[in-house]
Image (tube, rainbow, N blue to C red):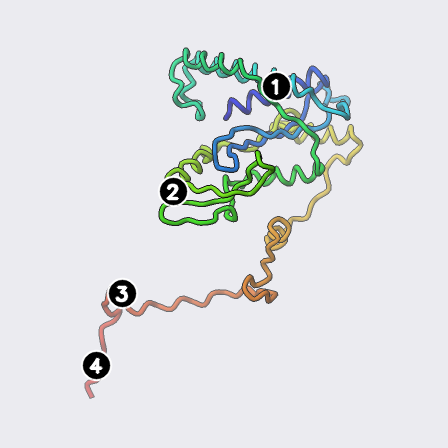
Amino acid sequence: MTLLFNAASQTLVQFGQRNLGGQIGCTMILHTWDQTLGAHFHVHCIIAAGALSANGARWIEADPRFLFPARALSTVFRGKFCAALAQAGATDAASRIASLPALGTPEDVEQLRAQLYTKEWVVYAKAPLAGPAHVLDYVGRYTHRVAIANHRSLDVRDGWVRFAYRNRRQGNRVQTMTLDANEFIRRFLLHVLPRGFMRLRHYGFLANRHKARTLRRCRELLGQPAEPPQRSSKSVVQWMQEVTGIDLTQCPHCGARPLVRLPLPPLSPPTACLGMPLAPPRFDSS
């Protein structure tokens, strides 16, 4: 997965320098699953429509019709990915690539690289249909995304799991799939990332090491305030209402509102444990 991030970022940075003559700003988001929890490793890239010149003196606008030619991106990305794969095999590091644990020898890696070069790779690019704000809001939730949401789980019974999925080959038609529990868990665990692995990464003038300075400069060149306006933080109730449509102030059973949060009463001490009294019995001797 790190190899995928590196090859994609190097490709975009190279196109920014050659086609725009400056440093691009890019955010990449790792996506590892498809609708049936199968392994489908790829990255989504959000790129600014321009670049910052090398000396930071001007903002270079991109062509309003497109950013980079997609076919050329595909060819360069394939070359960088395969070159990195070959280097990993030559340094005997292929066994440490999480998605390719069984390659073994450098000869096996070279054979795979040759096979990959015979395929035409596809890099898909398009403008944000619902606008940049919608895309950023959607992508920002990837920090807490899971491979399958609760509402897609339909039934768990007798060692089988049934869930809903959208069949993209049939016009996103909603269908159901049933897997035995072991296979369902195996697919789910394919998407558990190592501790500390970052699903979102930033490159170019958005890189963490200097983005405070470069973003400020970009805003100045674009005629924007040096610092973005402060946004008021939302409460949990507001966030849940906006994102999920769930009103936490309304009772989910009777619909009454507002719900009032009260402290729990103190727990009463247990009366007995394992059938033995907590205190010796008292007898009336009168």
Mark 2: few/some/many CA within 10 Å (<14, 14-19, 20+) = some
Q: Which SS class for mark 3? A: strand
Please name the residue that numbered disc 4 is placed on: 283
Q: Earlier in the sequence, mark 3 or mark 2?
A: 2
Q: Which callout, 1 or 3, points at the residue further toward the start of the chain?
A: 1
Location of residue 110 in the rendering, given as x and y in whole percent from the top left corner:
45, 12
Residue 164 percent location from the top left of the image? 51, 44
Give the CA separation, mark 1 to mark 3: 69 Å
Note whether residue 59 is visible.
no
Closer to viewer: mark 4 or mark 1: 1
Element at badge 4? loop
Residue at image x 76%, y 25%?
Answer: 65
Vertical comparison of 140 with 206: above or below: below
> Which of pointers 1 and 2 lies earlier in the amino acid sequence?
1
The CA distance from mark 4 to mark 3 is 21 Å
The total number of labels drawn is 4
Residue 142 numbered mark, or none? none
Q: Which residue is mark 3?
A: 273
Q: Nearer the viewer, residue 85 or 237?
A: 85
